[in-house]
Amino acid sequence: MDMTAKPSRQIFIKFLLLCCLLVGYFGYLSYEYDIATGGAAALITWSFFVLCTPVADAGFLLDFPLRLLFGIRMVVSEIAVWLVAFGLNAALMFYGPGYYKTTVLTELLYTILTNPFPYWGIIILSGLGTFLSIRFGDELMDVIRHRDRAFFHSHHFKHELVLFAFFLLVLFIYYRTISAIGMDAVMK
């Protein structure tokens, strides 16, 4: 990869690689099971990364193109992404709960969704982290376009301190929760 590429080009390349990863994962799951099961498992996995990781990685598949093409703030599109992820899981839990038995991540998401206490804490922490990271992503896009530059520069150090403290807290709580679920034994 060209390290001298412009930031917008690097972001576009990362977006394409992420899309290729999702398509490849769907292809693999479709080969292992069938197209319906592979598609459902890929969507459940996507929703796992939306709902259970504290950065906007899965939502990036929709947030970034909407921001570039239509100028929609990533915070707004991420709200839509979360609604789609919740709706998808509600529909699959009602109509096809067997799809959650396909992979370790889909089983983990099923455990998280069906046990409100304490596992919904993962979703709440992930939501906080996601929308905090999306806010920074929007700021970076604004700085690239030279909008809101004064706000970014005046609050940059404070944002980094809050972000660092938040991610330390998230890592600690994630470790505790993963240990409580028993996933630490599976990962070893």
Image (cartoon, grey):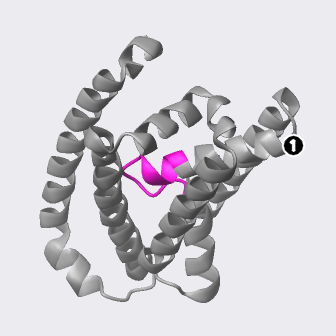
At a point 37% along the width and 19% down the height, the residue shown is 182
Q: Is residue 11 left or right of residue 159?
A: right
**Residue type at mark 1?**
Ile
Nearer-the-camera pick, 99 or 52 = 99
Q: Which residue is mark 1?
A: 35
Nearer-the-camera pick, 47 or 137 = 47
Res 127 → quadrant: bottom left
At a point 45% along the width and 16% down the height, the residue shown is 187
Is residue 54 inside the magenta stretch? yes
Nearer-the-camera pick, 50 or 34 = 34
Structural crowding at the residue carrying mark 1, measured as other residues with C-alpha within 10 Å and reported as few (<14), some (14–19) or many (≥20): some
Q: Which segment did they paint magenta?
A: 48-58
At a point 14% along the width and 64% down the height, the residue shown is 157
Res 67 → quadrant: bottom right
Q: Is residue 133 left or right of residue 87?
A: left
Q: Is residue 2 visible?
A: no
Magenta highlight: main SS: loop
The answer to whether 33 is drawn above or below residue 67 in the figure is above
Where is residue 13? Give x, y as percent. 65, 57
Q: Is residue 16 left or right of residue 175?
A: right
At a point 27% along the width and 28% down the height, the residue shown is 175
Query: In what element is the residue under mark 1?
Result: helix
Where is residue 77? Give x, y as percent. 51, 76
Where is residue 2? Give x, y as percent. 63, 50
Nearer-the-camera pick, 126 or 113 = 113
The answer to whether 24 is drawn above or below residue 69 in the figure is above
